[in-house]
Amino acid sequence: MSKEIYNMKRSILIWVFAFFITNVFSQQIVIKPITDNSNKNAPFNDDSSLYPDKYGVYGESEHEPMFPGGDKAYKKFIKENLTWPDKSGMVDVKGKIIVSFVVEKNGLLTNFNVIKKLYPSFDMAVVDALKKSPRWHPGTIKGRRVRVRYSLNFDFDIVDE
């Protein structure tokens, strides 16, 4: 009799185990992204890199900030407003300065940060010129103005004559 009970318990355990295994491995996990379908025609990929940091500043935007008048106007502005410090005593200086800043929703430039430095006086000359900048066209995401961090390169090549 005990052998019959043992076999019955064993059969029940096998059936329970088989039922458990088939239920666990037969379930499909479906993950649906939450999407905003209000603007289906926008050629903009809304991914995680487009979320603002803790200060509400985006690293990129659908429409990037732009100097008023475009590249040609920007180059003219820099040429007229960038005053280089005295170069006396500097021989064969070559390098790059990279400055990042935030283009605010109203187009003002704030939060300047020299990412790649050359010489302090040259770094400050670049920042000072950018502070004189007129208001930019701000970056936008889905038609809404947003704060965007932007970076610019300034190349130097000073050769003693």
Image (cartoon, helix red, strand yellow):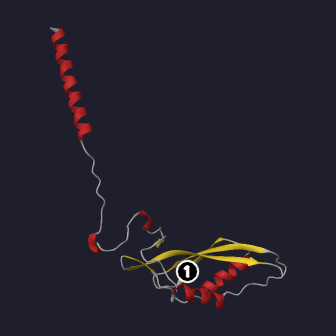
Q: Quadrant of the C terminus?
A: bottom right
| Quadrant housing residue 84 | bottom right
Left of 121 or right of it: where is 17? left
Q: What residue does disc 1 label? A: 110
Residue furthest to the bottom in view is 80
The kind of secondary structure element at disc 1 is: strand
Q: Nearer the viewer, residue 133 or 54?
A: 133
- Which of the two residues, 102 or 98, is positioned nearer the viewer here? 98
Residue 118, visible in the rendered structure: no
Q: Nearer the viewer, residue 112 or 89?
A: 89
Q: Is 46 positioned to the left or the right of 117 in the image?
A: left
Q: Residue at x 69, y 80 (%)?
A: 124
Q: Position of residue 76 (x, y in %)?
A: 61, 90
Compared to 128, does 91 lie above or below? above
Q: How many marks?
A: 1
On the image, the x and y values in percent for residue 83 come to 70, 87
Q: Residue at x 85, y 79 (%)?
A: 89
The answer to whether residue 31 shows anywhere in this view is: yes
Residue drawn at x 33%, y 74% as measured from the top left: 42
In the displayed structure, 17 sits above or below 148; it is above
Query: Which residue appears at 30% of the width and 74% of the height?
Result: 41
* Quadrant of the drawing holding the N terminus: top left
Left or right of 108 on screen, residue 92: right
Q: Residues within 10 Å of mark 1 (few under 14, many from 20)?
A: some
**Residue 12 percent coordinates (x, y):** 18, 23
Residue type, numbered disc 1: Thr
Give residue 59's position: percent from left, percent from top. Answer: 49, 70
